[in-house]
Amino acid sequence: MKGKFFVLGLAMLLLLGLSIGNALAASSVTYLGKSTWIATITDDTKPENIGASFTITGGISKVGDEFYLFQGYVTQGSDGPFVISGSGFMMGTTLIFTLCESQKHTDTWRDGGVMHVEIDKTTQGGTFYDIGHDFNIDAGSRAFDQRYTAGTLALAGSPIPLSATTVPQQFLLLN
């Protein structure tokens, strides 16, 4: 009889320990908020695009220490959404991201690429460059297209509190 209670008690302690571990892991990511940026193209493999702009909407989360995540999108009229996500870190006062991107156009083109973004912590404006490789799935053309775009970012929405930290939460959970 004592053996059964011992095993039951041990199982309860194990479950409690796993729950505490999961709570600590979940508490390390803090959603800082959603905002918008106006991206203005300053360089492009298609010169007719220079000067054009588009709006990026996205959210930033702090993973811990100097590490961050970004999830966002660009909508372009009736065309399919441009999905952007990735990770980065704060170096000094600059938040640097590497973002993966994809777009399924409403026509036969499918796009994919990588974007490098640098955002100033104070102004939350910055710069970006994008390298992409697109494909036309139309049976008649089956063509690839390579692209390069660079430009500036200007904050158009609410600032995101990039100085927020998760250290106090983690400290309380550890004690």
Image (cartoon, grey):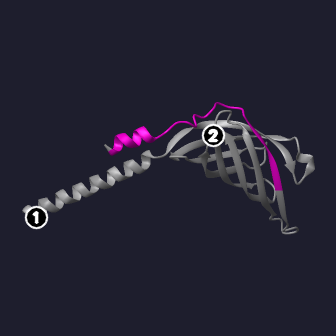
Q: Please tell me which residue is depicted at 61% across the width and 41% down the height of the picture.
A: 59
Residue 103 bears which disc, if any? none
Q: Please tell me which residue is depicted at 65% across the width and 36% down the height of the picture.
A: 35
Picture quadrant where residue 57 is located: top right
Q: Which segment did they paint magenta?
A: 148-174
Picture quadrant where residue 144 is located: bottom right
Q: Which residue extends farthest top?
A: 158
Crowding around mark 1 (Cα neighbors within 10 Å: few <14, some 14 to 19, many 20+) is few
Q: Return the residue at label 1.
A: 3
Pointer 2 with pointer 1, Cβ within 8 A: no
Q: Is residue 109 left or right of residue 120?
A: right
Query: Quarter of the image containing the N terminus?
Result: bottom left
**Residue 68: percent from the left, percent from the top?**
57, 47
Is 163 covered by the magenta stretch? yes
Query: Quarter of the image containing the C terminus?
Result: top left
Q: Say what amino acid the circle numbered 1 marks.
A: Gly
Q: Is residue 147 left or right of residue 21?
A: right
Q: Which residue extends farthest right?
A: 48
Q: Return the residue at label 2.
A: 93
Q: Say what amino acid the circle numbered 2 marks.
A: Thr
Q: Please tell me which residue is depicted at 35% across the width and 40% down the height of the picture.
A: 172
Crowding around mark 2 (Cα neighbors within 10 Å: few <14, some 14 to 19, many 20+) is few
Could you say which is closer to the camera, residue 173 or residue 9?
173
